[in-house]
Amino acid sequence: MTNQGNLSPICVKNALRHFGKIKALDDFSLTVSPGEFVGLIGPNGAGKSTLIGSLLDLVNLQAGEARVFGHAPGKKEGKERVGYLPEFFFCPDYLTPRSYLKEIGSLHGMDSKQVLDASKNLTALLGLNAHMDRLAGKLSKGLLRRVGIVRSLFHNPDLLIFDEPAWGLDPFGRKALNKILLDLKKQGKTLLLCSHNMEMVESICDRFVFIEGGKIKGEGSNQDLSVEDEIKIVYKNKEKVISKSKKSNDCWVVLVKETEREEQIRKLIDSGSKIIEVSESRTDLIDWVVSKIEEQDSK
Ligand code: ADP
Ligand code: MG
């Protein structure tokens, strides 16, 4: 691999972008290493799309710099290794998914056959095959979103920048998207994911960056969501067997200390309970974000 191949997919240093009094990016720095899946979370207006824009040469920084694989935004060498799914994906009404993908493929120097071969698996996974020859103007929001996902991935990019990818997708589409992204993770691709869908961010990303007012207000990794020394046990029994168990649907749920794990499981077995789940107790991503906001407020 050349030196350039080793450079961070994303490196943003002291980026500044103000719109009048609004601080969209305020001395913002972030490095994403190869193979990392990073979730960028933050309220509306936090600066997420501005950050993405600065990486794609859509937003000019007033100070600082943004680099994609070591290249300035917009430079071909970096740009062709990026798969970008914008928050508002647009496909002209008069094109079909097939003709649209062919047009985009030609920009990547791919002929029709290469485009169709490269998108075959994605269109099948996303349930698009039956819609490839329908006019985009007649497609639902969710189907168009699927076309956008294929468009951002079929040229086999190394860095994926996805802005609210699940927007408009039904549960089947979301499931397919999760599978696609997890497969790409196994292949060593890198992802910057902006999403309000905490479940998706939590299940896919290794690292979370919380942004607000154009600044990073908190950073954490997936491990930070595990509560050490606590085990969650879910069991079924007519009666409560372990004190402090709480009823959840037709099950009991209880958190026990790691050191008590075996003793409590033995107790459940002896009582004839059915053990449904034994897992590490985890904090929700949203709770983690709230704790970061509280930390900031108390400073
Ligand atoms: P997010 O994607 O986190 O919702 P954005 O990056 O889109 O946030 O926007 C950050 C802030 O910058 C918002 O207050 C937004 O209104 C403002 N902003 C973004 N782009 C522009 C623009 N072109 N002109 C004026 N204000 C903008
Ligand atoms: Mg946005």
Image: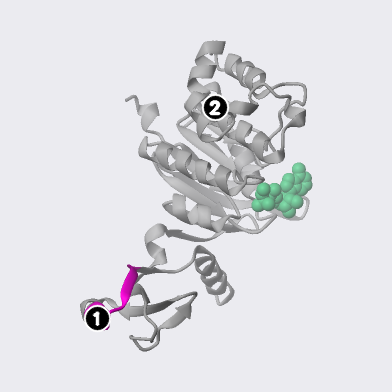
Residue 79's tag is 2
Q: Position of residue 8 (x, y in %)?
A: 42, 38
Using a 10 Å C-alpha cutoff, classify the residue at mark 2 as few (fewer than 14 neighbours), some (14 to 19) or many (20 or more). many
Element at badge 2? helix
The yes-or-no answer for disc 1 within 8 Å of ligand 1 is: no
Extent of the magenta region: 265-279
* Along the viewing direction, whichever of 160 and 118 lies nearer the viewer: 118
Query: Which residue is disc 1 drawn over?
Result: 260
Q: Is residue 150 left or right of residue 137?
A: left
Q: Is residue 269 located in the magenta-colored stretch of the structure?
A: yes
Residue occupying image coordinates x 41% and y 44%: 36
What is the C-alpha distance between the residues marked 2 and 1?
Answer: 53 Å
* Foreground label between 2 and 1: 1
Furthest residue to the bottom?
243
Q: Is residue 106 visible?
A: yes
Point out residue 2 in the picture as x, y percentages from the top left corner: 34, 24
Residue drawn 54% across the image and 29% down it: 123
Q: Is residue 199 above or below residue 80?
A: below
Q: Is residue 218 above or below residue 242?
A: above
Secondary structure category for the residue under label 1: helix
Q: Quick one: label 2 or label 1, which is nearer the N terminus? A: 2
